Image: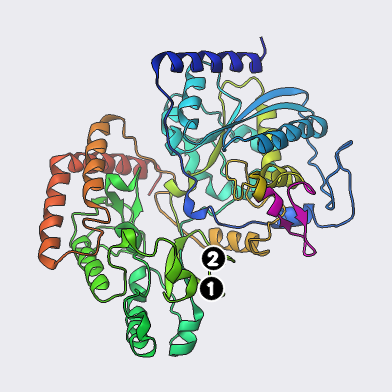
Amino acid sequence: MTRKILTLALACMMLFALVLSGCSDSGSASTTAASTTAAATTAAATTAAATTAPAATGGDWDTGSVEFTPLGIDGGGASLQWYSAMPPQDTRNQVWEEMESYISTVYNMDVDMVLTEWSEYPSKLKTLIASGMAPDVFYMAPAFGLLDYVADDVLLDMTPYFDSCMPKTYAKVSGYLDAVTFDGKVVAVMPFKDLAENNSLLYDQRWLDESGYEMVEWTRMYDLDELYYKLREWADTAHPERHDIPITTMYDLFYRNFNLETYSSPNTTIVTNYDGMEFVEGYKAGSEMFCMYDTPEFLAHVKRLNQMVTDRIYPYDKENYDKDNVNRKSGDQFSWTSQGYLFAPDNLTDYECKLQMQAVSMMYTGYVQAALTSIYSDTENPEAACQFVEICHNDPYLGSCLRFGKEGTHWTMTDNGQSDCTMGKESGVKYWYGVQIGDITNCILPTDVEPTFGEALKEMNDSAVHSSNLGFSVDTTDIQNEITAVSAVCSEYLNGTSLYSGMLTAEESDKLVEEFVNKLKDNGVETILTTFQGQLDAWRAANGK
C-alpha cells in the first residue's frame, strides 16, 4: 500500500471518528508575526533569476520571462511527503499540484505536498507521527511540539547531510544552527528570514519637518519619551484640533520595553537580561533568571503607561482607540510601533510614512526556532528529503510559484524585475512571506516590498546581538501545572483593562501589582524559576558559558 493511500485511509478514519464523537481538531500557530509583512529578495535569487529573456528550463516547463537555472539535484525517483501549514483552497491547490509535476520533471522525485489549515496542523501532525505515518518533511516550531519530538527522537539529525545534500542551505543558516542543535544533533533548518527580533517605529516625517525636531535612535521605547513630549507640546499649539489625539500607540509589553530574553513563553514570566542591556538591575546578564514582574522596574513601567495616557502620549482606552486607523492613516497621529519591518511599507497611510528601526536586534533561541523545517528520523529516503529541503530553499522558480502562483496567471513581471501579484491576491493564491515554504528570499520580489530587502535582512541578522544562551531550550515537562496556572494569572492582569490599560491611578497600580505578584507566587512561579535556573546552570556549564 502506498504512502498516499495509507494517508488517505488514515484521514478517512480520523474524519469518521470526529463525526461519531461530535468533536473537531483544535490548535493554534503563528508565524512571528511581526514579520509577516517583511519583504524579500536575495542575492541568490537575483543571481539565479536575473535575465529577462524568455526561457523554458527543465524539459517542457515554461518559466516565463525570467530564466531560472535548476539546481544540479537528482532525487533518484524517491517518493516523499511534505506536510506544511497553509490555508488550502482550489487555486492554490492547483498551483501546488503543478509544482509537484515540476519537481518530478526537473528533480526526479515524487513529492506529495500537503497543505493544512493552521488550526489543524499541530494535532494532525501529532496524529500522523504517533501512528507511524509521519511525513518525510514537515514544518516545525516549538508551538507544534518541537521539544517533545526532540525528546522522542522523531527528528532526523541533518548534520551528516549538509555537505552532500544541502550545501547552499547550510551556507545561509550555518551561523544560527546552535538554536536547533540538541546533544550535538541538528534537528531542523530555519528559512533565511529575520532571525533576530527587531521592533520598529513607523511615523509621519511631516511632524518633524514642521516642528523642527529630529528623529532619535532608540534601543528601547523609553528613549523616545523626550521626543514624544516635545511633539505633544508643539502639536497643542500648532494643531489644537489634534488635542485629543495621542502622539503614538501604546507600547505596553514589559519584556519588549526592557529588551529581556524570554523562555518558553512570555507568560511563564521567567527572563534574563541581555549582555550590555541590563535594564533590570540586580541580575547578572545571561546567567541569572528572574520573574520579570516581581521587580521595581515593572511597577514603574505600569505607572509610566498611566502617565503617558494622562499626558496624551498614549491613547486612553487603547482597546477601542482608532479601530479603523483613521488617525494613523491621515497623519493626525505621529507614529505607531510594529515588528519585522525593514522598510516602511507602501499603502498604509495617505502620506509617505518613514521607519526607524530599533538600534539593536536580539537573536535568541525562541525567535530563531519560530519557523523551521524538519525531517522524520525514520524516513526511508533521508538523502532525498534533504535534497528536497535544499530545493525549497534555493530554487527561486519553485519559491515564487508556491508563494504567488504562476506567472501570467497570478503575477506579472515588472520592468524592474519584481512580481506584480495583483491577480494572485485577488484569487487568494498569494501567500507572501511563507516561512513554511523555505528561504523567504528565494523568489521574485513582489512589488509591495523593497528590492534591497535581502541585503538589509542579512545585515540585520549579521549585526544582531546573540544571546549567550542561544541554543538553550527549557524543559517544562515536570511543571506543566505551574505553567498553566501562572499563564492564567498573567492573562488576568496583563491586558488592556488591567495593568496594561494605562488607566490606573498610582494607588491602583501599587495594589494591583502587589496582588498580581502574590498570585504568581501562589500559583507556582517560584517553582518555575527554580526549575528553569537549574536547567540553565547545567546547560551553561556543559557549554563552557
Q: Are marks 1 and 2 in contact (CB under 8 Å)?
A: yes
Residue 359 appears left or right of 425 = left
Is residue 358 among what the camera can see?
A: no
Q: Assign the N terminus to one quadrant of the image.
A: top right
Q: Give the range drawn in magenta.
A: 407-425
Question: Residue 456 location in percent, x, y?
Answer: 60, 64
Amino acid marked by disc 1: Cys
Crowding at mark 1 (Cα within 10 Å: few <14, some 14-19, many 20+): many
Q: Residue 353 carries which label?
A: 1
At numbered mark 2, what does the secondary structure look like: helix, strand or loop? loop
What amino acid is at disc 2? Leu
Please provide percent x and percent y for residue 504: 17, 64
Residue 348: mark: 2
Q: Nearer the viewer, residue 262 or 117?
A: 117
Circle nearer the N terminus (1, 2): 2
Snapshot quadrant of residue 225:
bottom left
Residue displayed at 37% across by 49% down: 545
